[in-house]
Image (cartoon, grey):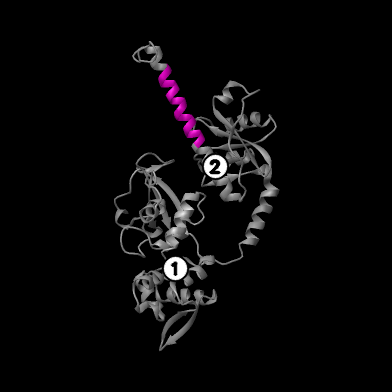
């Protein structure tokens, strides 16, 4: 009962169903808008202001019925974020027309959507519609000059080289060995380590040369074999010296309902799922696994998702092996590399706690 009205009353039932649907839609809107905020911070290095609802004054009903409107500030400019309420409900031409009417209110307007195909993206760009697809696409023609200058400055500040994936995988494998065996404290024979991870001798040689060029080690030849001696005397010090050159192993992420049977044996727990098992971080709502790109066949339409749903998986496709460490978790060094730039303060604290175990 609600007051004196039975839930079985048809009018009340419709009202309750409508209200619940609105609540679900608003939750989805806020979740997408929050993801867009994080993506803007990640892509631009500029933190948008807090989200605020935008009063729909002066806008016709067919626009407010299509979009939830929120307001942020970006680079000090007011920006209206227009979040499409129903994915795929409008054509690109309809989106462009409505965005122009919203923009007539005076603010830069950013169309936010969870997914967009290549054809629709091309049409939106042709009509100069600013849009954001969190984690994937960002198009801001109104800030084109400032944006290019920002990325140019960002590139100039990113002068340090990043290790090749094979070099990083081999280094991390060796550091894991150092933490578990005494014998590996001596010179490091690179070729057997390369073979163990499925790399050729040539790849092992290139990795050794790169570590020397980065100033982390010196080459010592014993017969025809190439050995490395690190300049730092402990695993923790080698890690600290190498960190500026370390890259995230994650090439891309995908959401799936279930793991395809052909890849299950190659998958290892990763991301916040793996971090929670090794620190005080709470278990995340969705499970994350990592798979080497050579073992990922692509996203099967039977399993693919546009956005996460309860009980689904986030798949990280990695640039190198996910089986450096034994067990069902990715190795802790790669895990740190994949999460150290997280925007979540709880995650960053847990990452630092995990780093504290490197000895």
Which residue is drawn at the image coordinates 46% and 85% (left, top)? 220
Q: In this view, does 181 lie above or below 96?
A: below
Q: Name the residue under label 2.
A: 36
Percent position (x, y) of residue 300? 37, 46
**How far from the left and from the top, in percent, is residue 337?**
47, 60
Front in this rendered view, residue 267 or 173: 173
State whether the magenta stretch is mostly helix, strand or loop.
helix
Is 203 placed left or right of 37 in the picture? left
Say whether residue 194 is left or right of residue 114: left
Residue stretch in magenta: 15-30
Element marked by disc 2: helix
Relative to 177, is 99 above or below? above
Residue 158 is situated, as x and y percent measured from the top left of the image, at: 61, 62
Pointer 1 with pointer 2, Cβ within 8 A: no
Sequence-earlier tag: 1 or 2: 2
Q: Residues within 10 Å of mark 2 (few under 14, many from 20)?
A: many
Image quarter in which the C terminus is found = bottom left
Tag of residue 166: 1
Determine the image quadrant of residue 336: bottom left
Q: Distance between the residues labelled 1 and 2?
A: 33 Å
In reply to whether residue 21 is colored magenta, the answer given is yes
Secondary structure at badge 1 equals helix
> In which quadrant is the N terminus drawn?
top left
Q: Is residue 109 left or right of residue 24?
A: right
Task: Give the residue at the far top of this rendering.
Answer: 4
> Does residue 176 belong to the magenta stretch?
no
Among the 4 quarters of the image, the one containing residue 129: top right
Q: Is residue 106 visible?
A: yes
Label of residue 344 in the image: none
Residue at 54%, 42% (x, y): give it: 36
Does any portion of residue 250 appear in the rendered image? no
């Amino acid at each position: 009962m609600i007051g004196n009205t039975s839930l079985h009353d048809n009018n009340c039932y419709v009202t309750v169903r409508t209200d619940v649907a609105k609540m679900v839609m608003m939750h989805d809107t806020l979740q997408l808008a929050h993801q867009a905020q994080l993506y803007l911070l990640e892509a631009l290095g500029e933190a948008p202001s807090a989200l605020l609802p935008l009063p729909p004054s002066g806008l016709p009903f067919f626009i407010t019925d299509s979009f939830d409107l929120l307001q942020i500030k970006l680079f000090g400019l007011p920006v209206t974020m227009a979040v499409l309420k129903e994915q795929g409900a409008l054509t690109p031409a309809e989106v462009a027309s409505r965005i122009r009417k919203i923009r007539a209110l005076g603010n830069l307007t950013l169309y936010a959507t969870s997914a967009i195909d290549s054809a629709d993206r091309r049409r939106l760009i042709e009509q100069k519609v600013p849009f954001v697809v969190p984690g994937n696409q960002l198009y801001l023609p109104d800030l084109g000059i400032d944006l290019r200058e920002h990325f140019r400055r960002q590139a100039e500040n990113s002068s340090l080289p990043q290790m090749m994936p094979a070099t990083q995988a081999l280094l991390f494998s060796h550091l894991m060995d150092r933490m578990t065996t005494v014998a590996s404290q001596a010179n490091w024979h690179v070729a057997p380590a390369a073979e163990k991870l499925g790399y050729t001798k040539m790849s092992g040689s290139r990795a050794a040369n790169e570590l020397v060029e980065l100033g982390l080690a010196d080459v010592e030849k014993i017969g025809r074999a190439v050995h490395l001696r690190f300049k730092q005397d402990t695993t923790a010090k080698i890690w600290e010296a190498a960190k500026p050159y370390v890259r995230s192993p994650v090439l891309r992420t995908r959401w799936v309902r279930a793991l395809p049977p052909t890849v299950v044996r190659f998958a290892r727990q990763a991301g916040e799922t793996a971090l929670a098992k090794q620190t005080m971080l709470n278990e995340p709502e969705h499970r994350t696994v990592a798979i080497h790109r050579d073992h990922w066949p692509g996203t099967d339409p039977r399993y693919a998702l546009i956005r996460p749903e309860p009980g689904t998986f986030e798949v990280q496709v990695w640039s190198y092996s996910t089986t450096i460490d034994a067990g069902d978790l990715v190795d802790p060094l790669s895990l740190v590399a994949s999460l150290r730039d997280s925007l979540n303060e709880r995650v960053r604290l847990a990452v630092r706690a995990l780093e504290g175990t490197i000895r």
